[in-house]
Amino acid sequence: MRCANVGRIGVFLGALVLSAFALASAASAESIAFIVNAGNPASSMSPAELKRLYENDTVKWPDGKNIVLYDLPVKNDARKKVSTAVLGKEAEEVARDWANKKITNTAKNPPVVVSSGVLVQSRVAEDPGAIGYLPKGDVTSGKVRVIAVID
Amino acid sequence: MKKLFVACLAAVLMSIGAGPLHAEERKSADSIAERVSVIEAEREDLLDRLNKLVEVSGYVDGEFVMSDQAGKNNQFRLHHLSLFFKKQVTEQWRFFSEIEFEDAPFLEASDGVLDGGSDGKLFVEVMTIEYLYNPRLNAAMGRFLTPAGIWSIEHYPPFAATQERPLHIRNIFPQVTDGLQVNGAANLGDTVATYYLYAGNGEGNAGSGDNNEDKSMGARVKFKLPLLTKLELGLSGFSDTNSSDTEKIAYGADISAQWRNIRFQGEYALGDYDSAAGTDYQRSGYYGQFIYGLGNLDLIYRYDWYEPSDEADDDQKTVNTAAINYHFTPSVTGKVEHHFISPEDPSSEDYTKTIFTIAIYLGE
């Protein structure tokens, strides 16, 4: 009886571990959508163009409007994915780079870090110059437009 | 006809019955909409107030230093407490300043005379008033870090690989310039070109003025190329005549590259000194620094060489550095660095220096 119970516990723990792994894999596998305000004329952006925005190199839209960048917290899965896929660096390293730019007064347009994709979407929906990102499945507002997807 | 009458009567009765209910819901919805509108307005007002505040940040670091150099003791060092103040006054005007307290300054005076026990350094390292015209053209007036090379600007302990700077840094190009700078950046296709032009009072002058009529002038250009994870190439130049009539012209080249988790940074600088007394000499130095990143751990190696004067014998020095940085968070870094210092002078012995550091960035 005791052996059977130990066996059941083992199966349960194994299933738990596998589920956690599957969940983590699913989270990192989720596509990330970059969104702009629906009134922004930009229809699409390449990863290289996105990189220039999030690396302090491009600060204005082609029409001269200031770009307002939104970012998610360093520990956020979407942020981690964007950092490696678009910027080629770990999210923590990108955060250090921005802090270094701020401390040297060379940060021309640092991103505004907000706590969740919900806030990213609501801010971008209100601001014609804003751009941000969040899991693609969380894009629900008709006031924003998806201009790039990171798989 | 009867059916029509019944339908009309039912519609009238329903509207009469629903009337008060609709009115209540409408009143509640209007009240909620008004409250939301007030909350949004309060949020805008709060953000506006926050944006008008002076932004304060900074960094702090503490060290334990061990050295086998003759006459040096192992010691704790309260190396830096630096405060940064920044205010975006308007969209075009910005103020930025760095006040540095080095080695925990102790100053005590009585009757207007400093007591002999004063120690440490209090330094206004940066103080600029900036006009941001557009990304291609901005101006800054005040004291700024001399735009020459990489380490001159990017040297802050929470983000620099080592506490010890390469030997030639601040010995060829000056640390700071009091004057006027214009700078900007432009996209040339996929390449980003950044430039700095500046003029100032020159080296060795206090913030209150210039000891001679000659003004220092300098320039830097940097190209960020769309290659690797990051590739930046820079050139710098500087000229000045000091109050002893020694003319200096300095040149520099630098590179910063990254491919995945491997980073390389290198600089070369050459100063040409032409004194009125006829003693001409050159001063030069270079370093190459590799960083291999393993998650939050950085493994670092640097080779450093410096010659204060090509006219002097045996004054060259080389330093081999091995270091480890651990980034506890993006703002907190622990470092261990070990330097093997080798003077060329045969009468000077080689020695080592080991520094253990915790450095914290106090900003956002």
Image (cartoon, rainbow, N blue to C red):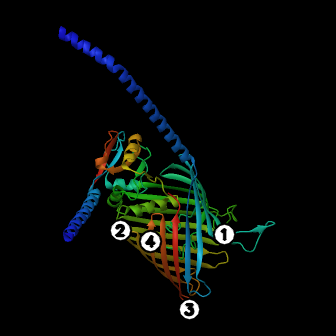
Mark 3 against mark 2, which lies toward the viewer?
2
Q: Say which chain tag 3 marks.
A: B
Amino acid type, callout 2: Trp
Eyeballing the image, is A87 above or below B39? Answer: below
Mark 3 against mark 4, which lies toward the viewer?
4
Would residue A123 appear left or right of B74 to someone viewing this image? left
Q: Residue furthest front?
A: A1
Q: Disc 3 to disc 2, how far (Cα)?
A: 40 Å
**Disc marking residue B259:** 2
Element type at mark 4: strand
Q: Which residue is painted at 48% across and 56% down in the image?
A: A107
**Disc marking residue B326:** 4
Eyeballing the image, is B295 above or below B53? Answer: below
Discs 2 and 1 share one subunit: yes
Pointer 4 local density, CA inside 10 Å: few below 14, some 14–19, many at least 20? some
Q: Disc 1 to disc 4, how far (Cα)?
A: 28 Å
Mark 4 against mark 2, which lies toward the viewer?
4
Amino acid type, callout 3: Pro
Amino acid type, callout 4: Tyr
Discs 3 and 4 share one subunit: yes
Quadrant in the picture for residue A26? bottom left
Q: Disc 4 to disc 2, how far (Cα)?
A: 20 Å
Eyeballing the image, is A136 above or below B25? Answer: below
Q: Earlier in the sequence, mark 3 or mark 2?
A: 2
The residue labelled by disc 1 is B105
Q: Earlier in the sequence, mark 1 or mark 4?
A: 1
The residue labelled by disc 3 is B346
Q: Residue furthest top?
A: B1
